[in-house]
Image (spheres, rainbow, N blue to C red):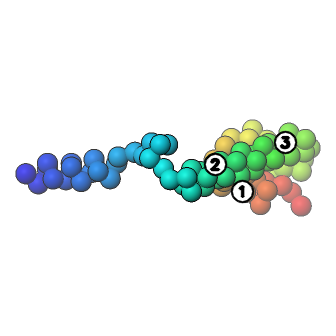
Amino acid sequence: MADRNASTRHSKKAAKKRWSDLTDGQKARVLVLGAVQLSLAAFAWTDLATRPKDTVNGSKGMWAAIIVINFVGPVAYFWKGIRR
């Protein structure tokens, strides 16, 4: 019986919301955060592509892969990836 109750609680927690389940405010936040993420990544990749490799800490390939990580990647690139 305990296992069944645990699985019921787990399935309630794991239930995914659909786009149609979100409020208008939640949809707006998701869209804004997505736009910010894409803008950061695009700006970081553009900077990386045009920056000479001797001004980048580490390899450009490594930083291109790190930039993919949501929010953290582009911020890490601008914070640690560029030699100053």
Q: Earlier in the sequence, mark 2 or mark 3?
A: 2
Q: Earlier in the sequence, mark 1 or mark 3?
A: 3
Q: Earlier in the sequence, mark 1 or mark 2?
A: 2
Q: Are marks 1 and 2 in contact (CB under 8 Å)?
A: no
Q: Are marks 2 and 3 in contact (CB under 8 Å)?
A: no
Q: What is the distance, in whole Å, between disc 2 and disc 3 at their CAs?
A: 22 Å
Q: Nearer the viewer, residue 45 or 12?
A: 12
Please state which amino acid type lies under the numbered disc 2. Leu
Residue 2: tell me if it is visible: yes
Residue 48: tell me if it is visible: no
Q: What is the distance, in whole Å, between disc 1 and disc 2 at their CAs?
A: 23 Å
Please state which amino acid type lies under the numbered disc 3. Thr
Read off the residue under disc 3.
46
* Extreme residue toward the left, this view: 1
**Residue at 35% across, 46% down:** 15
| Residue 76 badge | 1
The image shows residue 28, relative to residue 49, as above or below, that is: below
Q: Nearer the viewer, residue 67 or 1?
A: 1
Q: What is the distance, in whole Å, between disc 1 and disc 3 at their CAs?
A: 15 Å
Secondary structure beneath disc 1?
helix
The percent coordinates of residue 71 (x first, y second) are 66, 53
Q: Residues within 10 Å of mark 2 (few under 14, many from 20)?
A: few
Q: Nearer the viewer, residue 83 or 51?
A: 51
Read off the residue under disc 2.
31
Secondary structure beneath disc 3?
helix
